[in-house]
Structure formats: structure tokens, C-alpha cells
Amino acid sequence: MLKSIEEATENFCIHQIRAPHELKDGITDKRTLIAYIDIETTDNKKHRVYIASDANFMQRVSKLFLEEDESDEETLKDMALETANLIVGSAKVIAEEENINPYIISTPHFEKIGNFDYLYDEAKTITVDEDELTIAVKELDA
């Protein structure tokens, strides 16, 4: 499950942010903007995919898409939702193309600003300079 999302996140950094990145296991310990999207696989399993990024990472996204040098909190929340949608939507296409348990996605939801303190099964954190974005997956049926 995490493989296609991980690949989509790396593609996002390469093709959208256009900056070198590093991928590591685990979650960030920074204060983050947390959004999630629920997905359902073709084998009827439900998962929650969390996207948690520090404000600086999300400001990069805001600069990229909105050309804003300093976005307010509401804009950063919107960018967190859009980033979740872009990454998980891209991962959905990757899973379909590779026929790796394809899935459908729901609407993204903004959860909170704070430390990532949710249960998860798998997680990776991508770092661009000092900015971090965590992707975490939790099976909901388990």
C-alpha cells in the first residue's frame, strides 16, 4: 500500500517542487498540518492515508501553486488538502497501472495542526532541505 504512495510523493518532489529530497522511515517530530484521505481497495479493505507536513513544506507548495511568499493559516490548510489529493490521486493511478491492489479515494479532510500522534501501520518522511512531509497509512478494518 505505501509503495505507490511513496512513489507518488517522490514524484511530487521531483516534478512539482523540483528540489532534491531524502526519504526515511518513520514520522516527523515537528508540528505539522495534518490531512487525510480514506481509500478502499478492490479487496474491500479500508485505509486512512495521512499527509502531515511542517508549515515550511506547505509554504513551498503554496509558493509553487499560488505564488504566495507568506500564506496565512487557512491557505496552508487548503494547500495541505490539495497536496493530499494530488499525492494520493497520483498513487491511485500508479496502483492501477501496476495492478497493485487498485483503490478508490474519498475526499480529503483536514484533521489538525499539531504533532502527528495517530496510530499507523507504515510511515515514511520525505525531507526537502529542512522541510518535512510524512505519509502514513493505517488500515481501518483491522
Image (cartoon, rainbow, N blue to C red):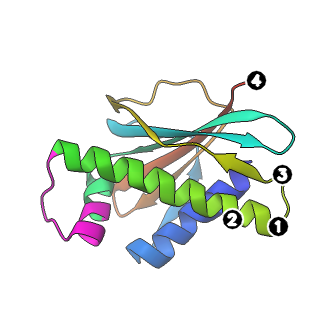
Number of the front mark, 2 or 1: 2
Query: Which disc is residue 98 wearing?
Result: 1
Q: Is 48 or 11 nearer to us in this picture?
A: 48
Residue at screen point 13% across, 65% down: 69
User: Which residue type carries mark 4?
Assistant: Asp
User: Which residue type carries mark 1?
Assistant: Glu
Pointer 4 residue: 141
What kind of element bears circle 4?
loop
From the top left corner, tell me how far across and down residue 139 is, in percent. Answer: 71, 30
Pointer 3 residue: 101
Disc 1 + disc 4, Cβ < 8 Å:
no
Residue at screen point 87% across, 40% down: 43
Q: In which quarter of the image is residue 30?
A: top left
User: Which residue type carries mark 3?
Assistant: Asn
User: Which residue type carries mark 2?
Assistant: Val
Q: Is 121 or 75 nearer to us in this picture?
A: 75
Question: Is residue 15 rendered to the left or right of residue 132?
Answer: right
What kind of element bears circle 3?
loop
In this view, 46 is above or below 82:
above
Q: CA gap, disc 1 to disc 4?
A: 24 Å
Residue at screen point 49% across, 46% down: 134
Q: Which contiguous range is marked in magenta?
A: 61-72
Pointer 2 residue: 93
What kind of element bears circle 1?
loop
Q: CA gap, disc 2 to disc 1?
A: 9 Å
Q: CA gap, disc 3 to disc 1?
A: 9 Å
Could you classify mark 4 by the number of other residues whose Cα lies within 10 Å: few (under 14), some (14-19), or many (20 or more)?
few
From the top left corner, tell me how far across and down residue 88 is, in percent. Answer: 58, 54
